[in-house]
Amino acid sequence: MSFQEQNIKKQKIIIIAIMAFLCAAFAAVGVIVGVPLVKSASNPEHFREWIDSLGYLGDFAYMALVVLQVVVAIIPGEPVEILGGYAFGIWHGTMLYLIGAFIGSVIVFLFVRRFGKVAAEIFFSKEKIDSLKILQTSPKRTLIFSIIFTVPGTPKDLLVYFAGLTDMRLSTWLIIAAFGRIPSAVTSTVMGETLGNQKYTSAIVTLGITLALSLIGVLIYKFVIKEKK
């Protein structure tokens, strides 16, 4: 084994250890919400009362779940977004989700900026990462990145990890991370609140709108990547 291979192996061990610590820390807080959720999800009123009884602890527990989902990219984000609307309502749930996602996005950005591509390859294949290389060289990289990150349906988890591999300034990423998830978060929390209030017709309509927006987002994402290639 060459020195370079040994160095990469050591980096991967360090990264996995850090990831394991972060996951354990956030999961310990997140389980405060997760376990009761499974038990009382069939009774929205009881669940809402339980959330209210937690006070600020419930807010922090939910945000910890969001941070965990962003950092551990294999966890699907949509159910976590819907949970925010279900538990806290549209605006409160959206606000908590955006704060948690912002914190998670900054952690990932700095983490990948420190350890490089080997950190991103923990969750994504080399092919997926290389498919976005055009965003490193395009003169309109920041604008394109902002657009595809904002549109619902695009692979935001991949984009979060890829952002740290570019020469994008942290200040620029902070702006994108703060505002880019708003459309997706709002549609999901609306769905969560309608489910919590047992307004199933409204939930189905919201789901249809969300799927349509996601399809448009996927098409835009594929078109932009294909055109830039």
Image (cartoon, rainbow, N blue to C red):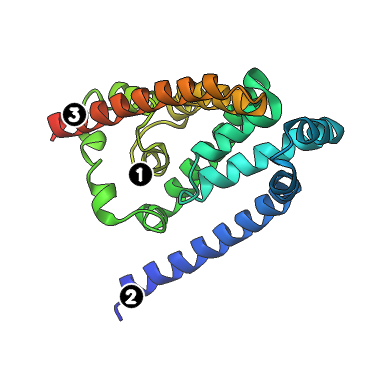
Q: Amino acid at mark 2?
A: Phe
Residue 146 visible, this orientation: no
Q: Is residue 187 above or below residue 122?
A: above
Residue 22, horizontal then vertical, whole percent: 62, 54
Q: What is the spatial separation of the Cα atoms under label 2 and label 3, in whole angstroms? A: 41 Å
Q: Which numbered dot is residue 3?
A: 2
Residue 10 rendering spot, x and y as whole percentages: 45, 70
Q: Residue at x 55, y 32 (%)?
A: 102
- The amino acid on which the numbered mark 1 sits, given as a three-letter code, is Leu
Between the residue at mark 1 and the residue at mark 3, the CA separation in whole angstroms equals 22 Å
Mark 1 is surrounded, within 10 Å at the Cα level, by few (under 14), some (14 to 19) or many (20 or more) other residues, namely many
Q: Which one is nearer the viewer's eye here, 169 or 195?
A: 195
* Left or right: 94 as drawn, with respect to 38: left
Instruction: Name the residue tied to disc 3.
Output: 223
Quarter of the picture containing the C terminus is top left
Q: Nearer the viewer, mark 2 or mark 3?
A: 3
Determine the residue positioned at 52% across, 27% down. Answer: 188
Res 143 → quadrant: top left
Residue nearest the viewer, comparing 79 with 10? 79
171 with respect to 190 (left or right) = left
Q: Who's the residue at 36% across and 31% down the image? A: 153
208 or 134: nearer the viewer = 208
In this image, 52 relative to 110: left or right? right
Q: Nearer the viewer, residue 135 or 37?
A: 37
The residue that mark 1 highlights is 165
> Which of the image's four quarters has the N terminus?
bottom left
